[in-house]
Image (cartoon, grey):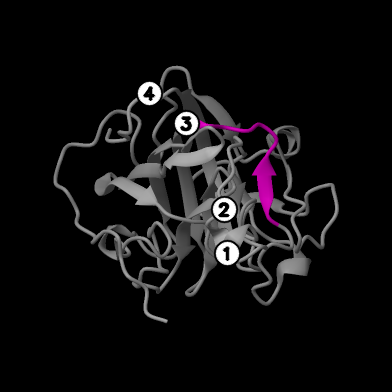
Amino acid sequence: MKLALLAAFTVTAFAAPDGVGVSAKPIAGAEVVLDGSRAMLDEKWTYWEGPGFKSALPIKWKIVDDAVDKGTVVMSDDPVAAGGKFGTADIVTKKAYRDFRLHIEFFVAKPGGNSGVYLQNRYEIQVLDGDKTPHGMGAVINQTESPYAAYAGTGKWNAYDIVFRAARFKDGKLSEKAIVSMYFNGQKVHTNIAITQVWGGKNSGVDGGNDGGKGITDSPQGLKLQNEGHDVRYRNVWIKELDLAEANTDF
């Protein structure tokens, strides 16, 4: 089935705001949730025990040396996910979030490496080397084109900087869709993209099995990182909680 795109990709040549890009330091009021240490991984994260969950605590993701810079990073390596078995060993923050600004850095070790950054454990920002389609690298999955030109490639660190506003509800019904804006390696690639549903089926996110992903619920959820059995690594992840009264996520 051919998907209708809700937004086309363009790179906007504006100066990036503070706290954007690879190695960006946390902005005032932000909480570091992943610093590459085992202590922080175990303190602030757990497995998402969704319908496809197959692993068990403690988290099996590895702490490995940074292949580019000093220090250690977190590697998505749980054997139960080998062969692309998504949903079997994803990790999620113990803390839930509503509106927020997120900085996250990722390193794809090999061609075809696949993972994903899930906002509110619902909406995926794709991490997939080699894919330039609406299912590909940097896309608000199945909602936008892939901003692939902003990708630094395998063996290098990349950064997503995101402002996210959660869906709003009135009298128990969805009244405003979730929206997101994003910089990719310092380039503005998405502005106020409305997200229509949770893609990927019931194993993908908290509302994935609810009315085919369209039955979004009114609950804050954690930041989730997907494990598909590929060597994808993460570092320097920080979040600042926001309260966005207006439907605008533009930096």
* Residue 97 point in image, percent of width and height: 57, 32
> Residue at position x 74%, y 32% from top?
43
Residue 215: which numbered mark, if any? 2
Tag 1: residue type?
A: Gly
Whether residue 95 appears in magenta in the rendering, the answer is yes
Measure how far apart labels 3 and 4 are at the Cα level.
10 Å
2 relative to 99, above or below: below
| Residue positioned 15% across, 40% down in the render | 14
Q: Does label 1 or label 4 sit earlier along the sequence?
A: 1
Secondary structure type for disc 4: loop
Nearest the viewer among 79 and 193 is: 193
Q: x, y percentage for residue 225?
A: 60, 51
**Which of the two labelled residues, at mark 1 and mark 3, occupies the earlier sequence position?**
3
| Magenta stretch, residue numbers | 90-99
Q: Which residue is mark 1?
A: 212
244 magenta-colored: no
Label 3 belongs to which residue?
Answer: 99
Residue at position x 47%, y 46% from top? 105
Does the residue at mark 1 contact the one at mark 4 (Cβ under 8 Å)? no
